[in-house]
Image (cartoon, rainbow, N blue to C red):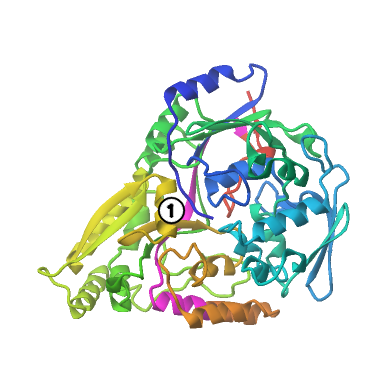
Amino acid sequence: MRTGIFLKATAVAVALALTTASASAVTLRSFNGGEPASIDPHRVSGDWENRIVGDYLEGLMTEDINAQPILGQAESFTISDDGLVYTFVIRDDAVWSDGVSVTAGDFAFAFARLLDPERASDYAYLQYPIRNAEAVNGGEMTADMLGIVVIDDKTLEITLEAPAPFFLDALTHYTAYPVPVHVVEEFGDDWIRMENIVSNGPYTPVEWIPNSYIRAEKSETYYDAANVQIDEVYYYSMDDITAALQRYRAGEFDILTDFPADQFELLETQYAGEARVAPYLGVYYYVLNQTLPELQDPNVREALSMAINREIIGPNVLGTGEIAAYGWVPPGTANYEFGEYRPEWADLPYGEKVAMATALMEAAGYSDSNQLTLQLRYNTNDNHQRIAVAIAAMWEPLHVNIELFNSEVAVHYDALQNVDYDGVGRAGWLMDYNDPINMLELLRSDIIYNYGRYNSAEFDALLRQSATMTDIAARSAVLRQAEELAMSETAVLPIYYYVSKNVVAPHVEGFLNNAKDIHRTRWLTITE
């Protein structure tokens, strides 16, 4: 999923929220990042939206306190011997917050809605392992041909195209959440308005102040409500992470989902143990608009990559220890029997890399009198700006002139998706499930999140081949071949592998670092 930290919350709105919360309620106030574009699971794509959606909706599978897949709305499942057919039995006590029972039909309806080509859900491809899902999403088949069968109200059968070792993990993603058929049929897309919305998860959204916060209350109809300790949650939206840290220090926030890198030392000395920095599965990267003639030259793309001094960004530019990334699949990814990809030039002294990169640029015709001028776009955030300024300086010796351009997260990602940028764009991806295909699919020619429009028929064919393979080792080898191909052609510019950067107040318990950086509120408690 995409990452970002952004939009506005006024002091007045925050103060109002602080004074109107019930005095007796156990309340969690979380700085959440960007303003949600939606909280409809078929309309969202960012981690800031996932934190909300995953608190009010729950799939057949959900995440435990370590973000590992566990049973959610399903009480049990079986898998056929050939690994193709999953049969789920839904809990008898799984109900929507209005008291209506959650049924297998709600799940079947949701999958069909997600894959409806007229809905054009950007993330529909995550459920392509389901039989005929891609064909349904592409308009080649109708929804009744989808590999999903409602056996009865509480039994759902899902058939896959091929065995998928990651499928249970993929079912924890919001693209696999149910939606309430009875509410959607009455209100259509307005079912998520606060006056209409119902939930099947531990919380129900009850208030949305645009560009300020969403407030959710504990759902008493949730099957595990007795063990949910927090009564209400505020998810605050704002773009100024420095201001967010100031509010945290003033006691107005309990959790920050990001912090300014230049404040890490202050946090370490004055708030020991509250800054939570840990590796997790994701890549911070730049995309290159390969529809532009000057960036269609693979030597130019490689030169730009070679000149990025990745080793100093984590320790020096950010100061939080991010690991330099030369490959696309993060270290530690499951079902992948290879170490981190590194090009031949990765371990050369930086001066030699710059000399080689400059030679490539000059061979392409660039010089001091004929510079390559590019725009470098990033979404508004102090850390993104810090990195952009540093990389722009690294590219200067290559006869590259960079114009920096920033915008709020929604505008920024809209520009990337529509390839409406003149050169380079900042992006980040957190893995939705722990399998290399989740990263590699981003570079498929037909995926909207392929922001640079890298287009390789050979790469696409390798991914299609992997989708039919049942041997994990053989599949892993094919996926590695795809990664090596894309990186050799500089499909994107990986910069560093993410570390999560949260700040958690001492009175919040149950917040454990994990490889997905997912922390559902149902597992948290607040002490005196």
Say whether residue 210 is visible. Answer: yes
**Amino acid beneath label 1:** Asp
Q: Quadrant of residue 302?
A: bottom left
Q: Is residue 175 above or below residue 24?
A: below
The stretch of residues the image draws in magenta is 481-508
Residue nearest the viewer, comparing 360 with 402: 402
Q: Quadrant of residue 86?
A: bottom right
**Secondary-structure class at tag 1:** helix
Q: How many marks?
A: 1
Residue identifier under label 1: 414
Viewport quadrant of the N terminus: bottom right
Q: In this image, 188 relative to 328: left or right? A: right
Can you give x and y, in whole percent of width and height, for residue 257 in the image? 50, 41
Residue nearest the viewer, comparing 475 with 441: 441
Q: In this image, 48 relative to 89: left or right? A: left
Q: Is residue 111 above or below residue 385?
A: below
Q: Is residue 259 above or below residue 171?
A: above
Can you give x and y, in whole percent of width and height, for residue 433 in the image? 62, 60
